[in-house]
Amino acid sequence: MAQRGGNDRGGKEPQTPVDRQLEAKILELLATRAATSTICPSEAARAVGGDDWRRLMEPAREVARRLVDSGQVHITQGGSVVDPATAKGPIRIRKVR
């Protein structure tokens, strides 16, 4: 299993099968929403993890950061796009406009 770390963001491909599931779910959720809508990483974590979704919160945030790196999504806080490397607290994910 790939080691997770704060500086391990070089690759754009999902690291594990769960990462691939989270990425697919994030993109699926965004595809079903209006272009201006956002999702919470917890929505993907809940869909993939079921009752054990809380353990997937940080992996979901990591997947969102990789999607930012690949130019597919933005991470926002308070409606403004933020740098995912420095974002603290609750985040939202939206499609790149």
Image (cartoon, helix red, strand yellow):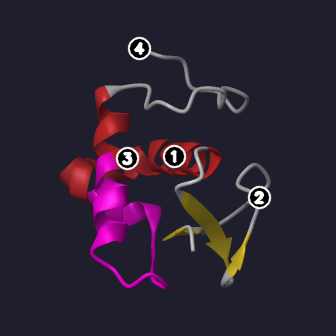
User: Does the magenta run of residues contain 25?
Assistant: yes
Using the numbered discs, state the Cα–Cα distance from disc 1 to disc 3 in whole angstroms. 13 Å
Query: In the visual, does 32 lie left or right of 14?
Result: left
Q: Left of 66 or right of it: where is 46?
A: left
Q: Is residue 12 above or below residue 76?
A: above
**Count of numbered tags:** 4
Disc 1: which residue: 58
Question: Magenta stretch: dominant SS?
Answer: helix
Residue beneath disc 2 = 83
Q: Considering only order in the chain, which callout, 4 or 1, is on the residue closer to the N terminus?
A: 4
Considering depth in this image, is 84 or 74 the residue closer to the camera?
Answer: 74
Residue name at image x 75 percent, y 66 percent: 82
| In this rendering, the label closer to the viewer, 4 or 3 | 3
- Residue at image location 45% in from the left, 51% down from the top: 57
Tag 3: amino acid: Glu
Question: Do residues under tags 2 and 3 come within 8 Å of each other at their CB atoms?
Answer: no
How far is mark 4 from mark 3, CA to CA?
17 Å
Question: Where is mark 3, residue-wise?
Answer: 23
Which comes sooner in the sequence, label 4 or label 3? 4
SS under mark 3: helix
Local crowd at mark 4 within 10 Å, few (<14), some, or many (≥20)?
few
Question: Does residue 29 show up magenta in the picture?
Answer: yes
- Label 3 near label 1: C-beta < 8 Å? no
Dot label at residue 1: 4
The one of 77 and 95 positioned closer to us in this rendering = 95
| Marks 1 and 3, the one that precedes in the sequence | 3
> In 3D space, how far apart are the residues under numbered discs 1 and 2 (Cα atoms)?
16 Å
Q: Earlier in the sequence, mark 1 or mark 2?
A: 1
The answer to which image quadrant residue 41 occupies is bottom left
N-terminal-most mark, 2 or 3: 3
- From the top left corner, tell me how far across and down residue 86 is, in percent: 80, 54
